[in-house]
Amino acid sequence: MQEVDGLEHPICYFSKKLDAHQKKYSTVEKEALVLVLAVCTFSVYFGSAPVRVYTDHSPLQFIERMANHNHKLLRWSLELQQYNLQIQHRPGKDNIIPDILSRPPIE
């Protein structure tokens, strides 16, 4: 997102279909996988400035602490350490644009 006149505007979208193995991941593993894939895809744009990551999945803020109990999260946490990420929780009701893209239309 890019903020213009106090309004957030999407500048790019990223999507990936989970394979059969990834569909069996826990919720926090799926959220962490998406973060790793998105960061790797867009890292060419980061530079040295901090990058704010907003997530409606609160536990993702604590991926470093959870990594001690899960080898997959440990690998991903180590991968993310090379970037200057600031992971912040944003409730789903306030995370409108990303949620709209992942929810079926209400009829």
Image: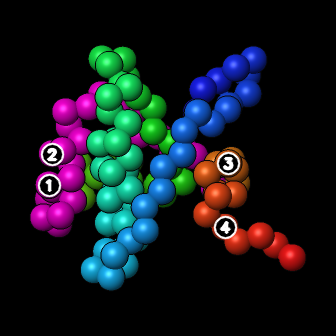
C-alpha gap between disc 1 and disc 4: 30 Å
Residue 65, image x and y in percent?
23, 52
Magenta residue span: 68-92
Q: Amino acid at mark 3?
A: Ile
Tell me if residue 56 can be seen: yes
Viewed as shown, does residue 4 lie left or right of 31? Answer: right
> Disc 4 on helix, strand or loop?
loop
Does the stretch in magenta take in 81? yes
C-alpha gap between disc 3 and disc 4: 10 Å
> Disc 2 on helix, strand or loop?
helix
- Could you tell me if the residues under marks 2 and 1 are in contact, i.e. CB atoms within 8 Å? yes
105 or 94: nearer the viewer: 105
Q: Amino acid at mark 1?
A: Arg
C-alpha gap between disc 4 and disc 2: 31 Å
Q: Residues within 10 Å of mark 3 (few under 14, many from 20)?
A: some
Residue 15, image x and y in percent?
48, 56
- Judge whether 72 appears above or below 1 on screen: below
C-alpha gap between disc 3 and disc 2: 29 Å
The residue that mark 4 highlights is: 103
C-alpha gap between disc 3 and disc 1: 29 Å
The residue that mark 1 highlights is: 75
- Give the label on residue 97, or none: 3
Q: Amino acid at mark 2?
A: Leu
Does the stretch in magenta take in 15? no
Residue at image x 36%, y 25%? 46
